[in-house]
Amino acid sequence: MNSFMLLQFSETVAAKSADIAVKDPHGAIITLVSVSVVFIALVILYYAYTLIGKVISGQIKLPARKQKSGTAGRNAPSPEEAAAIALALDQEMNGETYAAIGLALHQYLGSSIHDMESYIITIKRK
C-alpha cells in the first residue's frame, strides 16, 4: 500500500470515528451491541454442542439414509470394475510386500523391535 492509500484510509476511519463519537458519546450503543453479539454467540454454541453431544451419545437418532436397491454402497463398482481393481492390486502387491508386512508383524508381536538399553550415556574422548 502506498502512502496515499494509507492517508485516505486513515481519513475515512477518522471521519467515521468522529461520526460515531457524536452519535454515541459514552459508547453505550457499541457496548450493548458487542455484549449482545457475544452472548448470542455463546448461547448458539451451547445449544450446538449440546445437540452434538446427544447425537454422539445416541440420545437422538438421525434418520438413516436410504440406499439404492441392488447396490452395496453409494458408488459400488460393477463386477467388471471390481475384478479390474483386484487384478491391479494383485500385480502391485508382490511377494516382497507380503514378506515385509509379515516381518514387521513378527517383530512387533514378538517384542523384538527394541533391544534392552541401559539408558547410560557414555562419551569416549579421543
Image (cartoon, rainbow, N blue to C red):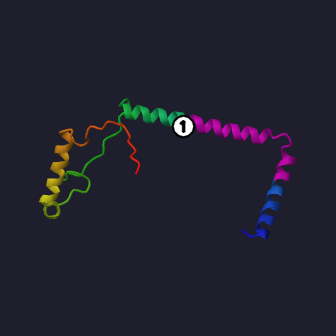
Quadrant of the rendered image containing residue 116: top left
In the picture, measured across the screen, residue 123 lies left or right of residue 44, that is left
Near-viewer residue (103 or 84):
103
Query: Residue pushed farthest top?
Result: 59
Point out residue 64 in the picture as x, y percentages from the top left corner: 30, 41
Q: How many marks?
A: 1
Near-viewer residue (2 or 60):
2
Quadrant of the rendered image containing residue 80: bottom left
Q: In the image, what residue occupies the spot 62% across and 37% down?
A: 40
**Up-down relation of residue 43 to residue 83 (above or below):** above
The secondary structure type at the circle numbered 1 is helix
In the picture, measured across the screen, residue 89 lies left or right of residue 23, that is left
Q: In the image, what residue occupies the spot 74% across and 38% down?
A: 32
In the picture, measured across the screen, residue 32 lies left or right of residue 17, that is left
Residue 84 highlighted magenta (yes or no): no
Near-viewer residue (8 or 59):
8
Residue 25 highlighted magenta (yes or no): yes
**Up-down relation of residue 76 to residue 119 (above or below):** below
Secondary structure mostly taken by the magenta-highlighted segment of the chain: helix
Q: In the image, what residue occupies the spot 64% across and 38% down?
A: 38
| Region of the chain picked out in magenta, as a range | 17-45
Q: Is residue 67 visible?
A: yes
| Disc 1 target residue | 45
Q: Amino acid at mark 1?
A: Leu
**Up-down relation of residue 74 to residue 34 (above or below):** below
Quadrant where the image shows the N terminus:
bottom right
